[in-house]
Image (cartoon, rainbow, N blue to C red):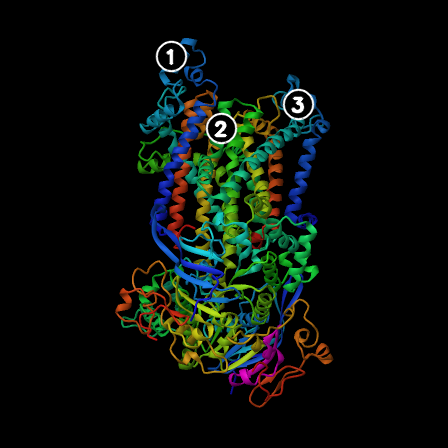
Amino acid sequence: MSEPSSPPLLELERLSCHFPIRGLLGRRAGTLRAVDDVSLSLREGEALGIVGESGSGKSTLGKTLGGIHDPTDGVIRLAGEPIATQRSRRPLSVRARLQYVYQDSGASLDQRWTLRRSLHEPLVIHTDWSREHREAKVREIAGAVGLAEEHLDLYPHELSGGQQRRAGLARILVLGPQIVVFDEPTSGLDFSVQATVLALIRGIRRMFNLTYLMISHDLNVVGSMCDRLAVMYLGRIVEIGPTREVLGRPRHPYTRSLVDSLPRIGGPRVTDRLGMPGEPVFPADMHQGCGYRTRCPIGTLACTRIDPRLVIKEAHGVACLEWRP
Amino acid sequence: MTKLIKSIIGHRTALAGLLLLVLVTAIAIAAPLIAPHPDAAESFHIDRRLMPPSSEAILGTDRMGSDIFSRVILGARMTLLITAAVVCSGVIIGVPIGLIAGYFNTGLSIALMGVAEVLLAVPQIILAIAITQSLGPSIGSVILALSITYWPFWARLVYAETRSICNEIFVESAIALGASSWRVIFLHILPNIASSIVVRTTVAVGTTMFASATLGFLGLGPPPPSPEWGRMIAESREYLPEAWWYAAAPGLALFVTVLGFSLFGDGLRDILDPKTRRSG
Amino acid sequence: MTALLEIRDLCLAFRTDKGPAQVLDGVDLTVAPGEIVGLVGESGSGKTSLARAILGALPVPQAEIASGRIRLDGVDMLRGGKAAESLRGRVVTFVPQDPLDSFNPLFRVGTQLADIMRYRAPPAKEGRFGNARHARETAILEMLDAVQLPQSRALLDRYPHQLSGGQRQRVMLAMALLPQPRMIIADEPTAALDVTVQVQILGLLRRIAAERGVAILFTTHDLGAAWEICDRIIVMYAGQIAEILPRTAFFAKSRHPYTRMLLASLPEPGREAIGISGESASPLSPPPGCRFHPRCPMASDICRKARPLPSRSEDGHLVACHHPWAAASSPAHV
Amino acid sequence: MNAYSVVANRLVWFLPTLLGLLAVVFVLARIVPSDPAVLAAGENASAEQVQETRDRLGFDRPLLEQFVEYLREVARGDLGTSVYTQQPIIRDLAERLPATLELTFVGVLAAALIGVPLGVLSALHRNSWLDHMLRLASVLLIGVAPFWIAMQLQMLFSMQLGWLPLSGRIDDVAPEAVTSLITIDALLAGDLQLFLSALRHLVLPALTLALPGGAVVMRFTRTAVLDAVTSPSVAYQTAMGLPRRVIVWKYILRSALTSTVTQLGLVFGISITGAVVIEAVFEWPGLGTYAARSILHSDYNAVMGVTLCAGIVFAISNLLVDLLQMVIDPRGVK
């Protein structure tokens, strides 16, 4: 596969985000490698999904991109330009172009503010527009996410869960971002509401020509919403590739077990086959070798010593010693 | 706001407290007008010493022959004045320190909160005693001493509330959006913690009153003959049990005032803080 | 076939500040011995209240059972007094949604297991030394083995927060099994778990039900989980039963528009899920007639006026709808 | 963070707190009075004497230097000499601290004995007339100034009924000091008469502490029990049919007491503060009367000594509460 000529819109190079584990007297007793040496890139208009179980570091990755955590190491580039690493230094223009949407985007609304005031706020911070100008933009975006005029004068607690998420989304969209990071956009929602939220995201993707990164524990959600998927385990990307490839022909044993664990309505019971044994270990406890070896059905002695690197062949990367194309 | 007033009226405890407070405040404000013998409150009348309650002096007279009723209602002014001054300075010093220390959470805030923690580590009344003693007994020194000892309460409360609200998503997202620090502090954090500050302040008023009365009781309050409840109670000890009315009046006045604030504070907490509502 | 659990015309309301909330309205259902029944519904459908009503764990001052009855193993659970009391935790046990909250954090796991064993389980066979305590511990260890918890003895000395999510749910399962119940009520037991762990717990539940002949009433909002383990699926909407179908009919032969739309809401790679527009019916002011009619594309006048009566076909498939899909037509999204 | 690191953290924080405390006391002693030398030399000192005192005590040297010197003195156990008792202050404090501790301990113990059972009772019979009465009583008790309670108790039980002594700690000669807690020393000496006398002296001051303290403990206990009653783990145990008595007296009580213990530490701190003024009323020969007398005689060093001493006791009690909290809550200090 040939590299696209223009630089990718978003590029992560060996990004790490570690947290100290404080022990005796506040001394550093260990390191939680929440995100560890992650590299990936996104072309304009692309949708990349990141899946993994709790503790895989997918959410930390999203927050690091959104400028909520500072990376410990590595570079984030937006359209070829490195973004300053410390959050206090991230310039406003970058904040406007790259935005992060919280798991419960409604929770980003101040409970004591009306929706209108919350939607104005990004514009107040980022622009010197007149009140009327801002109001016009706010109404346009509110309409685009399916919020009615009269909703603007309500407080968040007066809205339903689905409407709150729409409002949170609108708050992000008023600034016209190029890239949006969606962190678990559907968790905690009923299926019927979840589907409408996903439809909304699909709609705004078309409307605003968005590039997005979607983080979720639900393979079905990212599978239906993204062009490419990255699978994370213990802070690392263990597999990355086109959605169809990753889900249809998973290469990493972890991806395979994730895919195999999905119930298939109308198909045979997956519990009839044996599920994956064990649960993820704590990301700080791993010292050597492949992080997945404790649960891996095909692990060998080499896996306890060698930490597999992500090897990309034909746009499909996998980090496993045992995988042979 | 109207909603708040409605819920206060609908809440029996809060309403009872509020009524008591209104009563005490009204008496304090109108004290010189209501007091039957305002002029006799601070002077010596040897012929009228230690008279039991009668139609002439409805709560009796004290060892100086002053009308106790007049002294008690004039004392309400003194107590409310001291308390208001202490609580205001506590809020004015403590709230900004707590906000800044909580929001920035740097070396400076560790230093600020360290000072607060040290002051909290000394039993308040003993520290206040030490300060008033070095300043000499006067209203000013009581206010100063109690202000120095009590601001850390607000600082610690606001610090803790700010720390926890900084972890809330709406604050985090406002920061990620690029909102300036003052914007986050004054438009997002402060309005959201205001209700706990109010509740805590109402409760703290009672504590402050006790403290100022205690200083008076120990002879460290405003010097005689100013009418101060704590000192009046202390004076009465020599004349117990015969002159039982002597201690009763200022004691009850203090009790009613503190009760008003603690009832009102309890009610406000129920209304404003839904976390504790179910246990009410 | 005699039913183990039989619920007839159950109506339940909660007193709230804004007036009574009708949480359950005329619910009829039965569970046969050894059967796994899934109670599927979205939030506000009343499935959790139904589970709690059977267990007698409704919040006492607010809950008001207007009519109906719950019979478990022949005992009236609502008015049964002592007899019903003794059934709870013996004949019917419970697996909660959030195992961490359901443990008391201050007691060791072993203590909490031992108390269930001591007060709810049938007397264990006397140990070698005739020591009841010893016999109980043996029974507990055997049960922990049965739920596939290795090194179970060390586990007894741990506190709940020291276990992983999957381990906690397995211990909960062991606690539900210790009294040797005939029925387990599992309230969204896998909602808080990762998919790989969820699949293990679901598999375990099913195996246990089959091996021990325990009936399971399994509430979930996750259609996939219901598909995995249930023999029969009950779809609830806004406190009413919309459809009861055998597992085999769930996917291909569902007849209620709500069930079909739910299935069409599932995200799936390569397909755009269709949601259900509108808000779920409020229990404070449920719509008249069929409660689903404001969101139903097939709604007609009669749906707005009359509550649809359930109609049952010979294979036990029951649907409460004025305009059900024909039995043979394929699901909307295929 | 594990338990040991929490302990270590607390211990390490203890030192800066102590240092800060010393700094506060130092600042008060050296900066607030307009001329500490005048104060130290005494009221009738001549100008030369004042100057001599200033040179001797080094009041003209830089503050930091003076502070370091002061720290050295304190480290040697030298807090200066009391103008009034003409004794080293550290000795005065050593003589009086046990009396205050004895009073406070007994007061807090009584507060716990009154407050905990009533709190549990009040919570278990929530919204009954008993609950309302108890809550009203607690609000009233918290609203009364402690020194006023003290006086009323004196008036009733000593002056009018004559049942209990008006003031002091003992009638006769104190027993040989072993622990310096007279009640215990009397028991150690086998002198029952003396013990009873000491106890009779303790009743009123301890009760004065225990009444508002007990009210506070009762409120906390009530809230804690109610929190425990409505917790999901109790809902689970109820659904599992665990006997009510086991749930209440084993699980709920333990959960509630865990938070009550923390509050007891708080009450202890408040009581030490309260003891200062109560001792003055009862002429209890502890830190409080010492402080009051020192104030009366403008005995500056003595007041600072009391402040320091009380601060240290307070800090130690906070430390102990944290440690205790950690021992009884397996999740550790939050």
Assess disc 3: are there few (<14), some (14-19) or many (≥20) residues with their C-alpha within 10 Å of its C-alpha.
many
Disc 2 versus disc 1: nearer the observer: 1
Task: Identify which amino acid the numbered label 2 is placed on.
Answer: Ile
The answer for which chain carries disc 3 is B
Circle 1 is placed at which residue position? D52
D53 sits left or right of C220 in the view: left
Is C242 magenta? The answer is: yes
Circle 2 is placed at which residue position? B129
Q: Are marks 3 and 2 in contact (CB under 8 Å)?
A: no
Task: Identify which amino acid the numbered label 3 is placed on.
Answer: Ala
Secondary structure beneath dot 2 equals helix
Circle 3 is placed at which residue position? B41
Quadrant of the rendered image containing residue D186: top left
Image coordinates for residue A305, horizontal then vertical, percent: 27, 64
Query: Disc count in the image?
Result: 3
Placement of D160 over or under A82, stated as above or below: above
Image coordinates for residue C133, horizontal then vertical, percent: 33, 67
Disc 1 versus disc 3: nearer the observer: 1
Is C233 magenta? The answer is: no
